[in-house]
């Protein structure tokens, strides 16, 4: 039976072939990328043990990203919804407005150590791209961002930010013109330029090393939360429920990583897409089969033949047919529970939280809030829910306005 | 018994020339036309590679992507790919045919089932772009058992040590990727440098048939003709795209292009 081992970092629980639970992840890559991935794997395993590197990371997390991000009680939402106490980890307060800054910063630090002068990355919602362009500017690296043409249109504010940071944005016009195509095109670019260029995959997806680096970086969120919980409650509350949206799964992995060996309960919320649509982006909660996408085996939206399926979601950041191998592993070991909420429920949650509280979650974490709003009334007052508010709604202003007729923040 | 792939190389060596290997996508631009194309170009080519298209091809450039999307849009399924191979092999049983594609399609089809269908239709070899060594060891062994060639890839980034292991585990043919690029990139490395790397691999085991691919067109093919074989793919896909745009018949067009390629290496 597939099992999570105690006392071993979760990201290291793979076999020799880099498969978690013997079947998720791995390195299904063209021969050309074998060596650059090998080099990066060796470099990262050295760096994560190096005290100076960790010091440097912590320095930038504190002084550049702004750690810790706030942990607050949502008094009004709790009162309004009833049941469990609802808290938020306001990761959107991090520099740049989302959790993607952790992965971007670490990748830039690694690129520097590897002696690379160029960095490329993919982006869906535009946050991964915005943060990478920010960090690249900070660390003096030339930056190129691959982004689906459809996403460029719907996430304009982040596109503007990338341009301001001096990044070159490459519009991807193949396939569905969203994140899945951006990741493919970015990998293709890396195949051709891996000798001079470092690649940053924007989430806990792709060949194993990228899954690892990303989860290792975003884990800062759970490290902070453990301290904050102890400050608030004196200890980690029993059976605390940690609710997070999952697209590629980077924020959820970071939100949960340090809690794996505790009795905290994990709820992952996938994008169900428009109410009546069959095009969802929910491979874990909608019964998708295991397949190979972007170099890793994972549950993935696909047809019988193995062609990757189209997805649709109001949130560009969750609009991805695959999911991190780490989440596949958490699902099959039953360590986490995955559900999905649809576009309308997410919009409603955005509206409610933005109206009642001082935070305004983007459409991605709004999926998690929607789940919390459904879930809390079924729980006792002594139960504690924490939602990772991992992005700010500002980037979704256009979409929200066109759907609701107004925008509040 | 020698494989058809080995025999093809043997024949070329006898004629003191490089083997011409073509790549086209099954179902491009229609199922029927892709079969007609195979028939036409097999008069000039020594080995045929046939792509089974995937909609997320991470190592292919624009030309092959366009061909793949076109074929998929026309509804090509793996079943049709095997059908095309079978019908081709009915006419040309001795012409080696290699299927090339991405692993997910095999994974969904089931490895054993896939190989059974390869065998039934007459496939001689397989190139799986995203199943590198050593991940491909188990599958390559399965292929060998079925007398299907699993073709290993080597790239400019492959270390010498790794090269030796890959050559050791290879079957009758090895594919050397000429440069750091997706398919269809412009040849950005000098032929002299490519051949230098090529010779490094040959030195490990000179008996293995080593072919070069990526960036090979009518303009570059002559400069590399000392190799055992040369693969032309994107240029052929581009020819199909262009002939469709101009309302020309892709079959006759491709026949001519491959004929000309052959003349360049004689």
Image: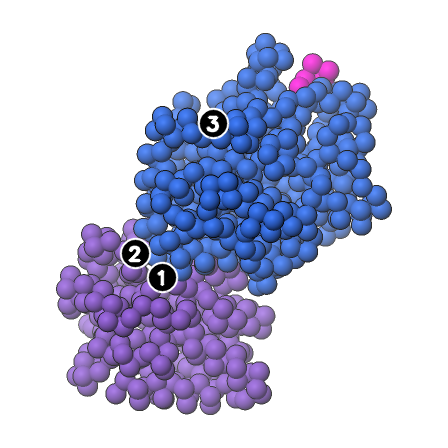
Chain colours: A blue, B purple
Mark 3 chain: A
Toward which corner of the image does residue A4 lie, by quadrant?
top left
Contact? badges 1 and 2 (CB < 8 Å): yes
Residues tagged by mark 2 and mark 3 found on one chain of the structure = no
Q: Tell me: residue B127, above or below residue B96.
A: above
Residues tagged by mark 1 and mark 2 found on one chain of the structure = yes
* Drawn side of residue B30 relative to residue A93, left or right: left
The chief SS type of the magenta part is loop
Mark 2 chain: B
Quarter of the figure that contains the C terminus of chain A:
top right
At horizontal 63% and vertical 41% (from top left) the residue drawn is A270
SS for dot 1: loop
Q: Which residues are magenta?
A: A379-385
Residue A75 is a magenta residue: no
In this view of the protein, can residue A114 be seen by the observer? yes
Q: Label 1 belongs to which residue?
A: B180
At horizontal 21% and vertical 77% (from top left) the residue drawn is B226
Mark 2 Cα-neighbour bin, 10 Å: few <14, some 14–19, many ≥20: some
Residue B65 image position (x, y, % from top left) = 50, 68
In this view of the protein, can residue B119 be seen by the observer? no
Q: Earlier in the sequence, mark 1 or mark 2?
A: 2
> Disc 3 to disc 1, how far (Cα)?
36 Å
Toward which corner of the image does residue B231 lie, by quadrant?
bottom left
Residue A327 image position (x, y, % from top left) = 52, 37
Q: Tell me: residue B208, above or below residue B43.
A: above
Mark 3 Cα-neighbour bin, 10 Å: few <14, some 14–19, many ≥20: some
Q: Which mark is residue B157?
A: 2
């Amino acid at each position: 039976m597939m099992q999570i081992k105690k006392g071993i970092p979760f990201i290291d629980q793979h076999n020799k072939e880099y498969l978690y639970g013997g079947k998720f992840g791995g390195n299904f890559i063209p021969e050309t990328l074998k060596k650059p991935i090998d080099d990066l794997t060796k470099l990262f395993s050295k760096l994560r043990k190096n005290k100076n590197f960790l010091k440097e990371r912590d320095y930038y997390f504190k002084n550049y990203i702004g750690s810790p991000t706030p942990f607050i009680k949502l008094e009004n939402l709790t009162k309004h919804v009833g049941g469990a106490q609802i808290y938020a980890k306001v990761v959107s307060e991090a520099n740049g407005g989302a959790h993607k800054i952790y992965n971007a910063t670490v990748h830039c630090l690694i690129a520097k150590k590897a002696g690379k002068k160029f960095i490329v990355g993919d982006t869906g919602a535009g946050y991964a791209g915005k943060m990478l362009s920010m960090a690249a500017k900070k660390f003096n690296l030339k930056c190129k961002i691959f982004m689906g043409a459809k996403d460029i249109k719907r996430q304009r504010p982040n596109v503007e930010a990338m341009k301001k940071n001096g990044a070159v944005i490459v519009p991807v016009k193949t396939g569905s013109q969203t994140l899945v195509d951006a990741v493919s095109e970015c990998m293709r670019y890396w195949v051709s330029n891996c000798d001079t260029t470092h690649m940053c995959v924007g989430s806990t997806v792709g060949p194993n090393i990228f899954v690892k680096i990303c989860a290792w970086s975003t884990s800062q969120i759970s490290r902070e939360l453990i301290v904050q919980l102890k400050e608030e409650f004196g200890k980690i509350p029993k059976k605390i429920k940690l609710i997070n949206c999952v697209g590629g799964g980077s924020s959820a992995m970071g939100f949960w990583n340090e809690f794996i060996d505790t009795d905290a309960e994990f709820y992952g919320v996938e994008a169900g897409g428009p109410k009546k649509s069959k095009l969802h982006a929910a491979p874990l909660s909608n019964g998708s089969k295991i397949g190979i996408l972007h170099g890793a085996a994972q549950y993935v939206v696909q047809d019988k033949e193995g062609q990757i399926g189209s997805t649709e979601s109001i949130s560009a950041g969750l609009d991805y047919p695959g999911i991190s191998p780490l989440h596949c592993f958490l699902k099959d070991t039953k360590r986490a529970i995955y559900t999905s909420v649809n576009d309308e429920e997410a919009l409603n949650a955005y509206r409610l939280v933005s109206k009642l509280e001082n935070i305004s979650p983007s459409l991605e974490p709004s999926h998690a809030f929607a789940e919390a709003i459904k879930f809390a009334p079924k729980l006792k007052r002594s139960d504690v829910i924490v939602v990772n508010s991992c992005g700010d709604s500002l980037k979704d202003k256009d979409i929200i306005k066109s759907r609701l007729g107004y925008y509040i923040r | 018994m020698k494989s058809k792939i080995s025999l093809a190389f043997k024949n070329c060596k006898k004629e003191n020339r490089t083997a011409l290997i073509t790549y086209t996508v099954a179902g491009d631009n229609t199922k029927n036309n892709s079969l007609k194309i195979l028939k036409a170009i097999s008069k000039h080519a020594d080995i045929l590679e046939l792509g089974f298209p995937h909609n997320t091809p991470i190592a292919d450039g624009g030309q092959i992507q366009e061909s793949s999307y076109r074929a998929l849009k026309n509804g090509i399924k793996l079943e049709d790919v095997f059908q095309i191979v079978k019908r081709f092999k009915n006419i040309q049983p001795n012409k080696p045919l290699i299927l090339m594609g991405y692993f997910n399609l095999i994974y969904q089809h089931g490895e054993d089932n896939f190989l059974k269908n390869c065998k039934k239709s007459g496939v001689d070899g397989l190139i799986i772009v995203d199943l590198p060594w050593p991940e491909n060891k188990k599958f390559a062994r399965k292929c060998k058992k079925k007398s299907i060639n699993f073709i290993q890839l080597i790239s400019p980034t492959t270390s010498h040590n790794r090269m030796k292991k890959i050559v050791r585990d290879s079957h009758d043919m090895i594919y050397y990727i000429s440069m750091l690029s997706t398919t269809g990139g412009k040849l950005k490395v000098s032929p002299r440098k490519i051949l230098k790397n090529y010779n490094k691999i040959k030195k490990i085991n000179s008996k293995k048939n080593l072919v070069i691919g990526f960036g090979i067109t009518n303009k570059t093919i002559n400069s590399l003709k000392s190799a055992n074989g040369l693969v032309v793919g994107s240029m052929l896909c581009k020819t199909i795209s262009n002939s469709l745009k101009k309302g020309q018949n892709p079959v006759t067009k491709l026949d001519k292009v491959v004929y000309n390629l052959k003349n360049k290496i004689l």
